[in-house]
Amino acid sequence: MTASNLTPVFSLHQGSLPLLISIPHLGTQIPADIAATMTPVAPRTDDCDWHLDRLYGFAKRLGASILTPTYARYVVDLNRPPDGANLYPGQDTTGLLPVDTFDKEPLYRDGHLPDDAEVARRRDVYWKPYHDALAGELAALKAKHGKVLLWEAHSIRSHVPRFFDGRLPDFNFGTSNGASAAPGIADELAALVERHGGYTAVANGRFKGGYITRQYGQPEQGVHAVQLELSQITYMEEHLPYAYDEDLAAKVTPLLEALLTTALARVKAA
């Protein structure tokens, strides 16, 4: 599927395992027509889930399917409901079409906020194709294997006062309080991190899973969804130019692989 400028909206690598890794906030591109309405802050894409395709590079070798978007979350947030409903009632969050950054810097020039028609257009052009691909690959993997694990890969700065106090735990597992995956799997994964040592972890804490985890995780139907919100301090620099840290990443990737294989084994046994 392509946008009007013929740039693909998403990329899907199809693997051999009943495992789909979705990285919905990886994109960094902003179409020229949208960029023209935005402030100079927007092209920095500060709130990108930087380098996760590189960090999860081992997953192709394992045989995972991997779905990634082209466009930045500032264009449309693929992990928000199509109606823009707040996933965390009473807490401050960014919306389907974010209007400011995590640090509350405005993304649009005065008088250029997207109207309802623009929201609908972006939902059709950028949001829907990604979700169609996601649903289609899950259906194909389930048909082939009977069960499937959807791993929602995310990352965020370790300090974002808008969303949480202090420093975020390194590994934040979310299963919508147990509703989106096999019972106890988030706690088991958090315990694995703690046993590994060197990192902190929590299950269903501040980040319980976004729209994708909640919408597609239906364990009773054989689809188990786990979100990992990884603190960026574990593998990269959290300030411009947001550089990948080879040494830090080399330490965290074996643990990520162990987490994926553990979760997949639990799903197969469920």
Image (cartoon, rainbow, N blue to C red):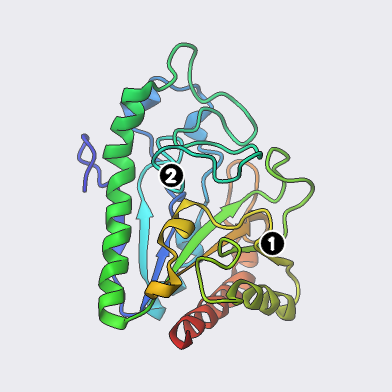
Mark 2 lies on a secondary structure that is loop
Where is 98 relative to 69, above or below?
above
**Amino acid type shown at disc 2:** Pro
Q: In the picture, residue 19 is in which quadrant?
A: bottom left
Q: Residue 84: percent from the left, percent from the top?
A: 45, 37
User: In this view of the protein, which residue sits in the foreground, 131 or 57?
Assistant: 131
Q: Residues within 10 Å of mark 1 (few under 14, many from 20)?
A: many
Q: Residues within 10 Å of mark 2 (few under 14, many from 20)?
A: some
Structural distance between the alpha carbons of marks 1 and 2: 26 Å
Task: Name which residue lies at 65% across and 43% down.
Answer: 239
* Residue 183, percent from left and from top: 57, 76
Residue occupying image coordinates x 68% and y 75% = 193
Residue lying farthest to the bottom in this orientation: 269
The answer to whether residue 230 is left or right of residue 267 is right
Q: Nearer the viewer, mark 1 or mark 2?
A: 2
Q: Which residue is mark 2?
A: 81
Q: Which residue is mark 1?
A: 170
* Residue drawn at the location 26% of the way across and 62% of the way down: 136
Q: Nearer the viewer, residue 270 or 17?
A: 270
Q: SS at mark 1?
A: loop
Q: Among all residues in the image, which is located at the extreme front?
A: 220
Query: Mark 1 is on which residue type?
Result: Asp
With 43 as the anchor, is 29 left or right in this view? left
